[in-house]
């Protein structure tokens, strides 16, 4: 691809979908870690 050409719509959509999936996975992982630390009490959270 030349520098003057814009990326094709398919690859732009694919990159956006991948970023959305990664963001969702990080959010779910963060919530799972938060829930696990709250269940374990102060020993694991420290």
Image (cartoon, rainbow, N blue to C red):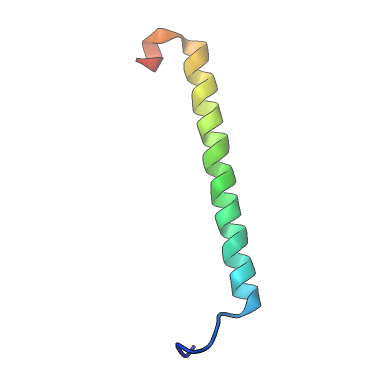
Q: Residue furthest front?
A: 4
- Asked which quadrant contains residue 46, the reply is top left
Q: How many marks?
A: 0
Please tell me which residue is depicted at 56% across the width and 43% down the height of the picture.
25
Task: Work out whether 33 lies above or below 23.
Answer: above
Please tell me which residue is depicted at 51% across the width and 20% down the height of the picture.
36
Task: Work out whether 5 lies above or below 11.
Answer: below
Q: Residue 34 vs residue 14: left or right?
A: left
Residue 32 percent coordinates (x, y): 54, 28
Q: Residue 10 vs residue 46: left or right?
A: right
Task: Work out whether 14 lies above or below 26.
Answer: below
Residue 16 percent coordinates (x, y): 60, 62
Q: Residue furthest left?
A: 46
Residue 37 percent coordinates (x, y): 47, 18
Q: Residue 43 vs residue 12: left or right?
A: left
Please tell me which residue is depicted at 61% across the width and 66% down the height of the picture.
14
Residue 2 percent coordinates (x, y): 47, 90
Please tell me which residue is depicted at 49% across the width and 88% down the height of the picture.
1
- Asked which quadrant contains residue 9, the reply is bottom right
């Amino acid at each position: 691809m030349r520098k003057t050409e814009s990326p094709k719509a398919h690859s732009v959509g694919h990159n956006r979908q991948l970023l959305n999936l990664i963001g969702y996975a990080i959010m779910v992982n963060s919530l799972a870690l938060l829930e696990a630390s709250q269940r374990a009490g102060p020993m694991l959270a420290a």
